[in-house]
Image (cartoon, rainbow, N blue to C red):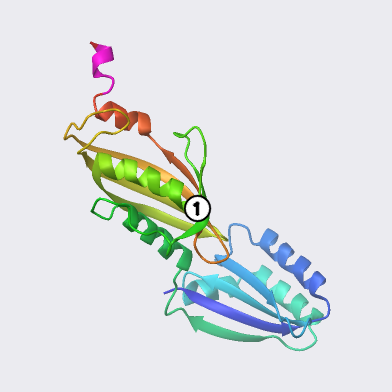
Amino acid sequence: MTFVQLIDCKTARFDEVNRLMDKWVEQTKGKRTATHNVIGKDRSDASHFIEIVEFPSYEEAMRNSHLPETDRIFREMVALCDEMPTFTDLDVVRDEQLSTSTVRRFFDLLATPGGEPPPLDEVMSEHYHDHDPANVEDAIGMDHVRRGMRMWRDGFDFEFSIEDLIAEGDRVCARWYWKGRHKGEFLGVPATGREVSMSGTTVFRCGGDGKLAEGWWEYDRLGLMEQLGVFEELER
């Protein structure tokens, strides 16, 4: 179970505390067990700071606390604080990256069975900007995206499986696997009925409203066309 520790302190010397944290990060390379660190400043009190440190488990947090570098840095930090810092230990009972949920929902919508593409308003900004190396120009706006979706949906019955989702800041990276049946014309290739597949990676940028604002796609369209038999005539 993921474990989080909150360190609540007051100091008028935050710049020095910040440098102290940089020093701890440098000194504990290869030894520390903390996986994520965030420091927030109270908007109503410029001397009030809360540090949020994430660990894989309580046991790993204790290992981290027992490092000699941690003990030394903590004593130096206390000297820079106006009063003794307080600690709150939390077992994480819910951990949800809302941006990754939006990306999952987007891929579900792409593969929704039926003729017309489903509404995308719930997951995509109106002026979404799409970067696809297979297209000469970027697609900007939801209408352009829907036209691209229609081309794929007319050509294939397909589904996605998400292999990995990694979120950092406003970016979400999805590694996905796609498989489908070629049921209709696609890029000039008549329906073959073949079962085809490919893998790819898409990096999304989420906007301030939590919806997808931009996307960068990488996938093997050449390999897909080979599976459709496009190059068989050339090889004869």
Closest to the observer: 114 or 66?
114
Q: Residue 234 appears at what percent x and percent y? A: 28, 13
Residues packed near mark 1 inside 10 Å, few (<14), some (14 to 19) or many (20 plus): many
Q: Residue at x 64, y 81 (%)?
A: 7
Give the answer, above or below, for where 4 lies relative to 192: below
Q: What residue is rendered at 78% in x and 66% in y?
A: 19
- Identify which residue, 198 or 149, lies in the foreground: 149
Tell which of 19 and 148 is nearer to you.
148
Amino acid marked by disc 1: Phe
Name the residue at 24% across, 15% down: 233
Query: Which quadrant of the figure contains the C terminus?
Result: top left
Determine whether 37 is above or below 186 in the image.
below
Q: Position of residue 95 (x, y in %)?
A: 44, 73
Q: Residue at x 46, y 43 (%)?
A: 217
Q: Secondary structure at mark 1?
A: strand
Q: Nearer the viewer, residue 114 or 31?
A: 114
- In percent of width and height, residue 128 lies at 51, 53
- Looking at the magenta stretch, what is its main secondary structure? helix
Query: Which residues fall within the magenta stretch?
Result: 230-235
Image: 189 above or below 203: above
Residue 182, picture quadrant: top left
Q: Quadrant of the N terminus?
A: bottom left
- Residue at image mark 1: 204
Question: Percent from the top left, x then y, of residue 46?
Answer: 78, 81
